[in-house]
Amino acid sequence: MTEFEALLRLHMTRGLGTKTYETLIERFGSSEAILNAPRAELESLSGIGPKLATAIIETSRTIDIASEISLAKEKNVQIIPYTSDQYPKHLKAIYDPPLVLYVKGEILETDVIALAIVGARRCTYYGISQAERFSRLLAQKGLCIISGMARGIDAAAHRSAINANGRTIAVLGCGLGVVYPRENIELAEKIVQHGAIVSELPMNTPPDFRNFPPRNRLISGLSLGVLVVESALNSGSLITAQWALEQGKEVFAIPGNIDSIYSRGTHKLIKEGAKLVEDVIDIIQELGPVAEALSPCDESETSDPRSLALNSQEKRIFSFLSSNPKDIDEIIQNTKLPTSVVTSTLMILEIKKLVKQLSGKRFVKV
């Protein structure tokens, strides 16, 4: 048995975390020696006890490590041990990093400059548009966008970072032999091309609600801070924000409609001291010296390369629109263009998938 195989067995032993592993290593010197240790010696150590000693001796020996390593290789997944130089430095610094990290794709050294963007699975159009806006602008500045690849805000953040040709990492609450949710299979493939998908769970671990709270500590652990876009009370996003606070990371929140249940979580965070953000500058200022290494960008329309391919009438209407719905009369009044021109131009912008029409002849920038 190699040291790597022994470490992987220990990682897959229920109830054994990094802190316990460090205690065992201090006593026995290697992962293989831990697996071969007598029960009495294991039980004599602080924090072990009969139950965990039994798990180490019996359960860890029955795990099919060969199949786990073979499946990881088949799926192009790296298994990176806690002891490796490839293990992400930010993650290693948290209180309880996983003993091994499963990685599909590549984590670069520059990905240490990262921000997590999280939020509700069921969310509003406003939430989606803000997640896309902040993810795009932060990715353009050189930050890696971390999220959980869930429906709603998470998926929007990943997609926007990819569309900006930026870096993004998804942390899953299941094994990398499983893609969840299934509708994000194509997104998962794109994330791998622009970053990585990671998990601490064995390859075939199915999604389970108990996996997600501990998963969230990895989202915050890989990041300099966490931006919560929309969140109900008692949601997973608030758990991620709590992990960030415990890890000494920055917490940011975007305010929303006071009548929306999806604003209650973010407003709670703001009341408790989270940084209220209205644009990316609010985030960059809090990052301090890290901001000096970032690429310049602003929120002027020239920062959106899509506007460069528009004619003057299209650009005038496109620049007026935002994530807040504007009705057609307001567009006509502010752009000072004839009704027929506004109507036909909006249709063209819709065809180009730059603008979306909502009910009541209201329009938003996509």
Image (cartoon, rainbow, N blue to C red):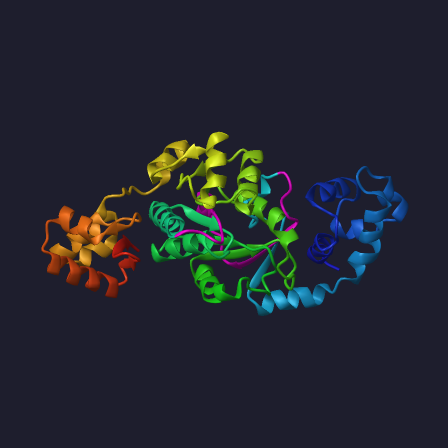
Q: Is residue 203 above or below residue 230?
A: below
- Relative depth, front residue between 227 and 366: 366
Seen as rendered, the residue at the extreme right is 40
Seen as rendered, the residue at the extreme bottom is 74
- Relative depth, front residue between 84 and 264: 264
Q: Quadrant of the C terminus?
A: bottom left
Highlighted magenta segment, given as a residue range: 95-124
Q: Quadrant of residue 89?
A: top right
In the rendered image, residue 237, in percent from the top left (x then y), is placed at: 52, 45
Q: Is residue 261 left or right of residue 340?
A: right
Q: Quadrant of the N terminus?
A: bottom right
Which residue is located at x 59 percent, y 43 percent? 92
In the rendered image, residue 200, in percent from the top left (x then y), is placed at: 62, 53
Q: Is residue 246 above or below residue 55?
A: above
- Visible in this render: residue 224? no
- Relative depth, front residue between 144 and 253: 253
In the rendered image, residue 192, in percent from the top left (x then y), is placed at: 47, 61
Total numbered circles: 0
Residue 96 within the magenta-colored segment of the rendering:
yes
Residue 102 within the magenta-colored segment of the rendering:
yes
- Relative depth, front residue between 158 and 6: 158
In the rendered image, residue 239, in percent from the top left (x then y), is placed at: 57, 42
- Visible in this render: residue 172? yes
